[in-house]
Image (cartoon, rainbow, N blue to C red):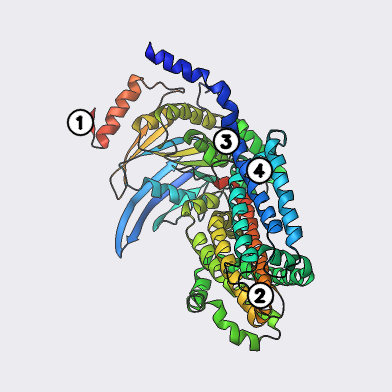
Amino acid sequence: MVVLTAAEAITYPAVGAELDIEGVSHAFDIDGAVLPVLDNVSLSIAPGEFVALLGPSGCGKSTLLRLVAGLEKPRAGSLREDEARITGPHPSRVVVFQDPTLFPWRTVWDNVALGLEAQGILKAQRHRVDEVIELVGLSSFRNAYPHQLSGGMAQRVALARALVNDPKILVLDEPLGKLDSLTRIAMQSELVALWQRKGFTTLLVTHDVEEALVLANRVIVLSDRPARIKADIAVARPYPRHRGDPYLAELRKQILGLLGLEATW
Amino acid sequence: MSTYSVSDTAAAAPRATVTFADLSGSYGVGLAASLAWLAFGLSCLYWPDVGDWSRTGSLGIGAIVIAAFILFGTLSADYLGSAGQALRKRAPWLVAFGAVVTLWEVATAKFAWLPLPFFPPPQAILEVYTDDLPKLLDSVLASIKLQLGGYIIGATVGFVTGVSIGWSQRIGYWVHPVLRFIGPLPATAWLPIAFFTFPSSWSASTFLIALATGFPVTVLTWSGVASVSSAYYDVARTLGAKPSFLVLKVAIPAALPHVFVGLFMGLGSSFAVLVVAEMIGVKAGLGWYLQWAQGWAAYSNMYAALIVMSLLCSGAITLLFRTRDRLLVWQKGVVKW
């Protein structure tokens, strides 16, 4: 299977980009009414950092990711990648969505090759597609069609499709949200290992407090819609982390409290 | 104890009945088919014809040859591989078909139960295929040429129009009302106008066939492109796709299943236009052949032409489906490599 070993120390190779979100507000027009979703969000993420965004359902986390990806423009404020203003999508900021959204008419290989093909550099870089498929452990499925894959395999393909572009910022929109709990745990460790190996900056949206704590350097807790930053928590623990770690358990309690769920603890 | 003895006798019996079960199972139907065709051949040869047909003898002999082939094929099906399997699978149809042609032969050529000029016997149709072959072939070629030209033009224009209005709102603004106004009109309604505005009846018919094909192809391509999930575009855009990539590599492949439904519907309606156009304006093709045969009260020629026409139309649809299965292999549960 996947040959990935998590290193002990946290290293930040120079691959990742710095991400600055400054005073960003955003709103949607729904049937003439203006629905504010983001309220003056400011956040600075260092190169190579792994940041998790936690917040109640529908608070605007995914909207923030769409802004980072450049799929939408904010109503106010600005987003910058390494000091350059984000004005549209760019393969240096790739998103992995909750649904794998593989193209059903393409094989695994062709799906992974999508980014290179779109940028017109596939011919020269075919080996990169093979490498990244190998990296996510799907070499024997390279000619399979998406409908032949399990949920976990499909999400691995989606991850490979993102990684083949050597992103500086990897944007993850609840990528493990629909997987069964065993696959989920396995893929969390793979994700950490990939991040440590590649060094990209990672921005992860999740509903799962434990997932955020196991994976991220920093956890940002957002409020109800319109989302504001409620807390910015550093998770100073080496990898690989253990789910039973009392330090993480204490943080989890605090975060659930911030989300208004202290009674469930 | 008694239950054992019952099953004992049941277990002892099969040895004798195995061959009989085989006979009535895999061999029986084949033998029945052979008998049905033998009956057809004998019915041709045994009774005298009530009319004057030159091919009765050859038809009878041909039927007996077919019966012999079926018999041989049935008995050696196990050694004939896929051909033997195919024969076994189609044996019930061969029985029914043999029975129907026998009945047809008896009811027309032998006892004239059906009024004669309108219901020609099988040998009369065989006579058309042997004696009027050049003219029939010319008609087939003319029809194929006309149909193919019109269909390819209509499908191409329909596809491009459908993609454009599905993709661009500005093009949709102008094309959609025209499409709504003209599209639902049966293409044959244009016939009188088309035949005097176009320089030749051939170009007029091509235009009409293209029109009949183009409308369903346009509408279904359009709806296919419009219904592509925006998530696919988001994915492609974050991976650095330009608009041309979004159209060619995302919208079109995603819309292809719809496009094929449109192509299928277009094929059906273009056949109707083809026949009408050939009957009215073009002096060639199977539609014209039908019209010509009717003028001469040559009913056997009409049946012969109808059979050919049906084979051609069904062949065209088979071809379209095969193409679809090849291109949309990703859609099916079972993938063929």
Q: CA distance from mark 1 to mark 2?
A: 85 Å
Q: What residue is shown with label 3? A: B24
| Residue type for callout 1 | Ala
Percent of width and height locating residue A154: 51, 38
The quadrant the C terminus of chain B occupies is top right
Numbered mark located on residue A263 in the image: 1
Mark 2, secondary structure of its residue:
helix
Percent of width and height locating residue A165: 60, 42
Callout 1 touching callout 2 (CB < 8 Å): no
Q: CA distance from mark 3 to mark 4?
A: 16 Å
| Residue type for callout 3 | Ser
State which chain disc 2 sits on.
Answer: B
Q: Which of marks 3 and 2 precedes in the sequence?
A: 3
| Residue type for callout 4 | Leu
State which chain disc 3 sits on.
Answer: B
Extreme residue toward the bottom, this view: B196
State which chain disc 4 sits on.
Answer: B
Q: Is residue A241 rendered to the left or right of residue B237?
A: left
Q: What residue is shown with label 4? A: B87
Is residue B336 in view? no
